[in-house]
Each structure stands twice: as structure tokens, then as C-alpha cells.
Image: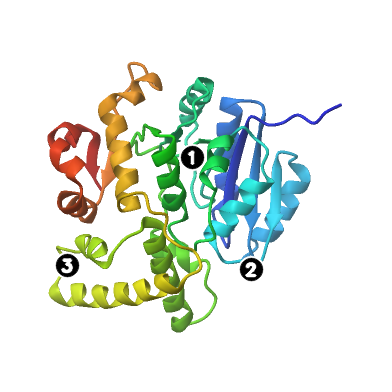
């Protein structure tokens, strides 16, 4: 008898999240069951030393839906790629093993999958057709910014249906970016600084961002803070220039391309097909993100009033 190919593949990369992974995978299992009986969970497990690796070994032995891919890299993009390559589903649903996801997304995922679209779904949990990921080149081995790097290519080529709910129950509290990256680090101050340098370098590659783009996020900082950030961004830009992974040029800053794609989807009312009669999308942004959009996005500048009901402040 031929093996049953799952419809949904929930894919994650993991390192040192023993305090969160058990609850996270339980929420994913509840979500998968609410959408479709045919699903799998694929976790690319790096060199965890906090007990997460041992827990995954035990859990995968008793849960036939859970598949663990072992590797030794401390690279989120590499882990994303390995999980995707080991998956089989028609729909790829990236998730974060440090988060709990609400079962309310079952309805949204089921409706979106039923459309058979080549676009991606952007919400607090995203979904991409396997064929779309393949045609866009998949995840690249970036330490940081790996999702923006892929999503920009996907949106430019296939488009996006955006429906973030902004509901407080949609996810558990996320780790901030620094705390998440520190789970990939073992060592002292130098190791931490080296990791954050690599993250910033790869985020510049992923976003195809200039130093000026990054400084636009910091317009409201003190003079001293802006000078320190400019020096750090300059070092990261030098590293990006020597990287073997090159930015994908799509005509604009790729972070901006993603944001403007979401905004255009809001204004087009795409979300109404996912939640007929439901609440409007709600995308919380930081003050720095608003400052960037105000200075760098002609689309936002033209449609700020129309977009206001869809945007909140973190």
C-alpha cells in the first residue's frame, strides 16, 4: 500500500527550547487536528544541550506524526531548509518552537488550503504551497532574516493573502530577537557579540537593506545611540559584502516589499474570503517600523489613512 502523503507539513527549526517546545508542539498538534487529519510535524533539531534533543527523541518514538531531522548547525535558515526538505505535505506551515499557537487558526488554514492558491498566507502562522516554495528557491542558509528573504521572493512572484488577527490569544508571548538568538550561543560576551553581528549581517542580505535603510528605523534614538548603530551597521555591511550569499534584488528593500504586499492585500479585502463577516486584519507595528514606513514607503505615504484601521502599535 502506498504511503499516505500529508496535506499539511508544520515545519520548524529548534535549538535549546526545552522550556517551551513541549507546549508548542502540543498546540501545533491541536491546530493540525482542527484543520486536517493528514498532517505531519517536522523539526530540524540543532545541537541542543538543554534537554530538548532528548525530549524530541522520546516524543518522536511515540508520535508517528513527528519527524526529527538532526544537524549540527546553529543557523536558522539552514534549519528551515532541512525541515522543508524532509517534509512531504502540499502545504508548508513554518512555526516557531518557542511559541504556542491558538487553535483558532484551524479555520483560517483550512479555508486557505481549500482555495488551492499559489499565493502564501500571511498571519500569525503562515502557509505556503510546496510548489511555491520550490519555485521561489526555498530558504537559504542565513543566520537571521531567513523568512523575509524567502517571503519577499514569494510575494514578488506569486503574491500574498494577508490576515494577521492581532488577537492577544493568537500566540503566546514571543521571545524578543536577542533572547531568541542567545539560545544559539554558548560562550561569553565575545560569542554573544559575534552572533549578533552575524544576525545583523544576514538581515542586511535578506532585506537587501542599506545602512540608510537601517538608520531610518532609528530616527528617534539619541545621537549617541544613532552613532553606535551606524558603526555597527557599517561593519555588518562590510561582512555582507564578503558573504557567499548575495541579496536577492527585487527592485526595493525586501522588508519593504513584504510590508507593502501585506498592505495591498489588506486594502484589496483578500482577508474577507478567509473570514466572512469576521474581524478585520490587525498588524501591530513598533514606533520604529512606523518611522521607517513614513520615510521609506511611497505606498504607505499614499495610503496611510486607509491603512490606519488595520495597523496597531506594539
Would you call the spot at circle 3 few (<14 residues within 10 Å), some (14-19), or many (20 or more)?
few
Mark 3 vs mark 1: which is more N-terminal? Answer: 1
Q: Which residue is more in the foreground, 297 or 252?
A: 252
Image quadrant in which the N terminus is located: top right
Q: Picture coordinates of residue 248 (x, y %)? A: 42, 54
Helix or strand or loop: what does disc 1 sit on?
Answer: loop
| Foreground label between 3 and 2 | 3
Disc 1 crowd, CA 10 A, few/some/many (<14, 14-19, 20+):
many
Numbered disc in front, either 3 or 1? 3
282 left or right of 113 in image: left
Left or right for 123, reference 97? left
Q: Which residue is mark 2?
A: 49
Measuring 43% from the left and 42% from the top, which residue is drawn there? Answer: 171
Looking at the image, residue 239 lies above or below residue 32: below
Task: Tell me which residue sits at (46%, 65%) in the image.
Answer: 181
Q: Quadrant of residue 46?
A: bottom right
Q: Position of residue 57 (x, y in %)?
A: 74, 54
Circle 2 crowding by C-alpha within 10 Å: few under 14, some 14–19, many from 20: few
* Circles 3 and 2: CB atoms closer than 8 Å: no
Q: Nearer the viewer, residue 4 or 124?
A: 4
Q: Report the disc number at residue 221.
A: 3
Amino acid at each position: 500500500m502506498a504511503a499516505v502523503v500529508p496535506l499539511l507539513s508544520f515545519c520548524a527549526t529548534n535549538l535549546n527550547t526545552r522550556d517551551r517546545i513541549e507546549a508548542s508542539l502540543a498546540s501545533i498538534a491541536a491546530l493540525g487536528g482542527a484543520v486536517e487529519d493528514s498532517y505531519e510535524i517536522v523539526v530540524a533539531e540543532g545541537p541542543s544541550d538543554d534537554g530538548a534533543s532528548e525530549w524530541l527523541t522520546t516524543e518522536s518514538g511515540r508520535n508517528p506524526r513527528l519527524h526529527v531531522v538532526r544537524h549540527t548547525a546553529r543557523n536558522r535558515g539552514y534549519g528551515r531548509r532541512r525541515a522543508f526538505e524532509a517534509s512531504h505535505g502540499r502545504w508548508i506551515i513554518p512555526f516557531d518552537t518557542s511559541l504556542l499557537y491558538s487553535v483558532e487558526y484551524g479555520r483560517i488554514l483550512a479555508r486557505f488550503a481549500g482555495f488551492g492558491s499559489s499565493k502564501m498566507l500571511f498571519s500569525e502562522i503562515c502557509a505556503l504551497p510546496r510548489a511555491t516554495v520550490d519555485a521561489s528557491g526555498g530558504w537559504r542558509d542565513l543566520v537571521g532574516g531567513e523568512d523575509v528573504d524567502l517571503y519577499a521572493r514569494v510575494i514578488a512572484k506569486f503574491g500574498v493573502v494577508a490576515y494577521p488577527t492581532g488577537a492577544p490569544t493568537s500566540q503566546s508571548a514571543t521571545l524578543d530577537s536577542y533572547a531568541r538568538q542567545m539560545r544559539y550561543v554558548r560562550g561569553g560576551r565575545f560569542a554573544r557579540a559575534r552572533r549578533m553581528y552575524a544576525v545583523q549581517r544576514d538581515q542586511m542580505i535578506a532585506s537587501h537593506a542599506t545602512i540608510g535603510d537601517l538608520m531610518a528605523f532609528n530616527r528617534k534614538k539619541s545621537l549617541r545611540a544613532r552613532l553606535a548603530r551606524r558603526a555597527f551597521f557599517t561593519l555588518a555591511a562590510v561582512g555582507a559584502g564578503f558573504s557567499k550569499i548575495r541579496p536577492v534584488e527585487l527592485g526595493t528593500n525586501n522588508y519593504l516589499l513584504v510590508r507593502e504586499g501585506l498592505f495591498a492585500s489588506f486594502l484589496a479585502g483578500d482577508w474577507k474570503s478567509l473570514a466572512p463577516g469576521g474581524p478585520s486584519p490587525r498588524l501591530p507595528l513598533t514606533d520604529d517600523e512606523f518611522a521607517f514606513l513614513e520615510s521609506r514607503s511611497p505606498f504607505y505615504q499614499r495610503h496611510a489613512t486607509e491603512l490606519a484601521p488595520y495597523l496597531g502599535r506594539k
